[in-house]
Amino acid sequence: MHFLSPEIEAYALAKTTDEPVLLEQLNRETHLKVLQPRMLSGHLQGRLLAMISQMIRPKRILEIGTYTGYSALCLAEGLARDGELHTIELNEELRPLIDRYFKKSPFSAQVHLHIGDALGVIPTIPAPFDLVWIDADKPNYHNYFEAVLPAVRPGGFIMADNVLWSGKVVESEIAPNDADTLALQQFNDAVQADDRVENVLLPIRDGIMVIRKR
């Protein structure tokens, strides 16, 4: 769900730097060939991720949930010259598409794909991290947060996507079997109450929680 009117969203896109050609191609191919293309970060959110990364100039980025690689390539735009991005994807079937676009990108030597369960892979990746992007299965958001926070440098950032979940997180009644919404409510509450971090929830696209480790 987008929380802006179509007219305002179209205006915002018109006043935002264009997608790089490679990302435009990946965007199109994802929509043509991959299930659930709405999972793609897309133009506006992608440019935001690139801008935040460029502000931080991270030396080491961790991404949990690669999907087809769009957000990884956006985040890689801000990497330090000797920086690395490690991205974790559970779905092995997406590897050929991800690999093809990573190899075409100017960051091919800096971006590393890991296939597997993120909670098992995270401890194998060298830390500390300057920036972490979480965009994977919602019931594990709090587990991912707890797994990565010790590996984030003081002053480093964690960002989590979809934290508004099409507005469902503010509904008065949540079905007991709606595991995704319940997990996101619990994640948002836990972050807000955690004195190890400071945070701001941005109502952009489907909601992005930006967390800074104290």
Image (spheres, rainbow, N blue to C red):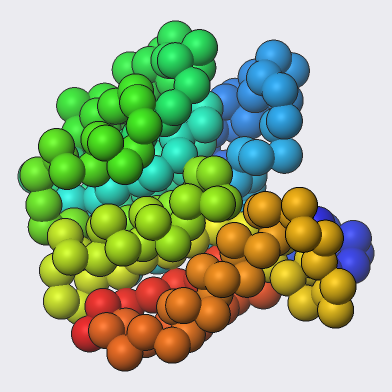
Q: Residue at x 50, y 36 (%)?
A: 70
Q: Tell me what residue is drawn at x 67 percent, y 19 percent.
A: 34
Q: Residue 16 versus residue 188: which sits nearer the camera?
A: 188
Q: Residue at x 31, y 69 (%)?
A: 157
Q: Can you say which quadrant of the picture contains the N terminus?
A: bottom right
Looking at the image, residue 9 sits to the left or right of residue 39; the answer is: right
Point out residue 131 in the picture as x, y percentages from the top left corner: 28, 60
Q: Quadrant of residue 6?
A: bottom right
Q: How far across and how far down the image is residue 101, in percent?
A: 43, 20
Against 72, is 79 above or below?
A: below
The x, y position of residue 213, in whole percent, is: 26, 78
Q: Is residue 127 visible?
A: yes
As drawn, which residue projects farthest toward the front?
Answer: 176
Looking at the image, is 135 positioned above or below residue 173? above
| Horizontal arrangement in the rendering, residue 213 relative to residue 126 (left or right) | right
Residue 55: quadrant of the picture: bottom left
Which quadrant of the figure has residue 124? top left
Q: Relative to 152, say whether 136 is above or below.
A: above
Q: What residue is rendered at 78% in x and 77% in y?
A: 170
- Number of callouts: 0
Residue 137 placement, left or right of 33: left
State whether residue 80 appears in this view: no
- Tell me the quarter of the image containing the C terminus: bottom left
Location of residue 24 in the rendering, given as x and y in whole percent from the top left corner = 60, 32
